[in-house]
Amino acid sequence: MESELFPEGSVDAGIYATPEEGFQHGLVVLAMDEACWLIEAEDGHHLRVEEKAAEAVRRQLALFDAESLGWPPRRVVEPARVQRHWPLSPWCWVLAVFAVFWAQGEWPGLTDAGLLDAERVFGQDEWWRAGSALWLHGDLGHLVANAGGGVLVFSAVVATFGFGAGWALIGAAAAAGNIAAVVLQHGERYRSLGASTAIFAGLGLLAGRAIRVMGRSGHPHRWRTMGVPLAAGLIVLGLYGAGGVEVDVLAHATGFGAGLLAGFVAAADGGGLAAVRPAHGLLGESGQER
């Protein structure tokens, strides 16, 4: 019976339950430039090859099977806690920063009283400036750019982490980013202001959470996929956070780093990933804008 089904001089390279599986393995044999036959029999679908090539074919098929473990990857499905009751909260933030900007014009001393100043932070322990500086802006163009980027990024963060947790994470990561920037600039004349540290912190939150989600996928090559959101975040950081003479690259980087860590830690609670468009900001005595 076997002689009637199988070509003379051929041997089994594998027996498969479905024709699709046999065909897939047959492509490997064809890629080796070897002849093969896929023949259906009572005990399954036989992939036959010439006897002289059998050993090499079986070795390649074993390698193919080893590399194909877990492929295609299991889809990562996690319920995103989308906060539907506060979709306008980023716009409320925009109104707030515009109100602060108006107050800066009415009371010029407000800017000096709240901006991030390394000398006052270390010399007078005014660490609260790490938070107050996020609400101040150097000019209208600076404010409009940050407002546009903030609406997009903060909307994604709030929809991902929830209203309370999202804004708390943004504030904490942005303040931590400002503190890190001041620490790294200790001993230098460093002054800054602007919401862009918070915007890049939000970008980091989204990237950090996406990395954590990819890490839970269970795929054997998940370490590769975890690099995708990190690379995407770094590319956006490089494109929008490192250009221009007056851009405070350090504050952008520390904000992103703080958000990345916070998002990774907070990812135990679920969420998602959103598209972002960051902005630039910060104008201080040092001539840097963020």
Image (cartoon, rainbow, N blue to C red):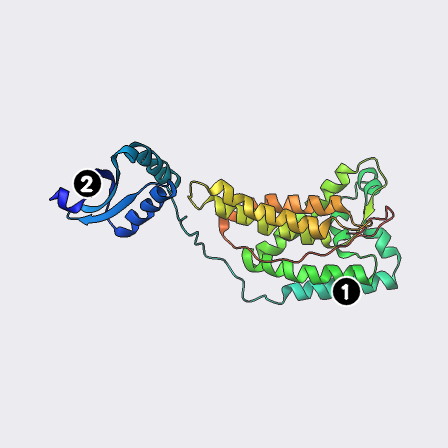
For residue 274, side relative to residue 41 (left or right): right
For residue 56, side relative to residue 261 (left or right): left
According to the picture, the residue beneath numbered tag 1 turns out to be 98
For residue 52, side relative to residue 175 (left or right): left
Quarter of the image holding residue 14? Answer: top left
Q: Residue at x 72, y 50 (%)?
A: 241
Tell me if residue 263 can be seen. Answer: no
Taking depth in this image into account, of 255 and 76 the one nearest to the observer is 76
x, y percent for residue 123: 83, 38
Q: Which amino acid type is shown beneath numbered disc 1? A: Phe
Q: Residue 15 carries which label?
A: none
Q: Which amino acid type is shown beneath numbered disc 2? A: Glu
Disc 2 versus disc 1: distance between alpha carbons? 84 Å
According to the picture, the residue beneath numbered tag 2 turns out to be 8
Taking depth in this image into account, of 34 and 21 the one nearest to the observer is 34
x, y percent for residue 200: 67, 51
Taking depth in this image into account, of 278 and 124 the one nearest to the observer is 278
Q: Residue at x 22, y 39 (%)?
A: 10
x, y percent for residue 65: 35, 40
Q: Residue at x 68, y 56 (%)?
A: 278
User: Across the whole image, how many numbered discs are drawn on residues?
Assistant: 2
